[in-house]
Amino acid sequence: MRRAFVYLFAVAAGCGIGIGSALAMAGLLPGANPLAFGNVDVDGWRSDFAIGSEAADAYTRARVARHGLLALAKSEAVYFTRTTDDAGQPLREACTYRLTTGAMPAGWWSITLYNADSMLPDNDDAALSINAGQDMAARIGDEIVGQGVGATVAPRRPEGRGLWISSRNAGRFDLTLRLYMPNDALLTDPADVLRPPRIEPLACEVAA
């Protein structure tokens, strides 16, 4: 009887650990971010270069399918995600940030804000993404705003005409950097080639 109990306990523990690890690796646990971990980390911007490649394992494919990433082949695009600011604190709607970046090792790139459910926040600000090409002409939609990229990430539009990424109704959020037509050097040595955007916290609202 004791041996049967030990066998049953071992089977139950194995199933629990197996299912739990599979859910964690696939990014299916509540609150998990599908790109918040991976085999590449450049100054807090994380990526999994297996995404969009033949090397993608079952866990990676599950993350892509479950979260609707629609990942392109690695030669066409690579994805980096940042969940914290330069001070190491989680990105959140109550704070205002200054995002700055220079040229990217890609033909064209974009930065998009997603909420904790990997969805676009529910707002109508039409300011959830910015993009630029190798000419560093920053754009919002089809409008060319200026050379170089410096954007404010905040729940309300800042004064002036600068770039703005709206975090209204986002709660905890992340920023995803997509690099389209990446340079070959980026794929072989990302830490040496990529100079990712900085995210400087400026101010945070104090809860009443």
Image: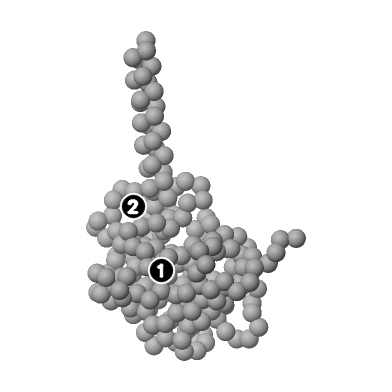
User: Residue drawn 65% across and 83% down?
Assistant: 159
* Amino acid type at mark 1: Asp
Q: Distance between the residues labelled 2 and 1?
A: 25 Å
- In the rendered image, residue 12, in percent from the top left (x then y), is placed at 39, 27
Mark 2 crowd level (few <14, some 14–19, many ≥20, 10 Å Cα): some
> Residue 127, can we see it?
no
Mark carried by residue 43: 1
- Figure quadrant of residue 206: bottom right
Q: Where is residue 98 in the image (x, y as percent from the top left)?
A: 55, 76
Question: Which quadrant, please, contains the C terminus?
Answer: bottom right
Rendered image: mark on residue 173: none
Residue furthest to the top: 1
Which residue is under mark 2? 61
Q: What element carries label 2?
A: helix
Of 94 and 136, nearer the camera is 94
**Residue beneath the point at 42% across and 82% down:** 102
Based on the displayed image, in which of its 4 quarters is residue 89 positioned?
A: bottom right
Q: Which of marks 2 and 1 is nearer the N terminus?
A: 1
**Nearest to the observer: residue 103 or residue 178:** 103
Q: Is residue 163 left or right of residue 102?
A: right
Mark 1, secondary structure of its residue: loop
Closest to the observer, 16 or 73: 16
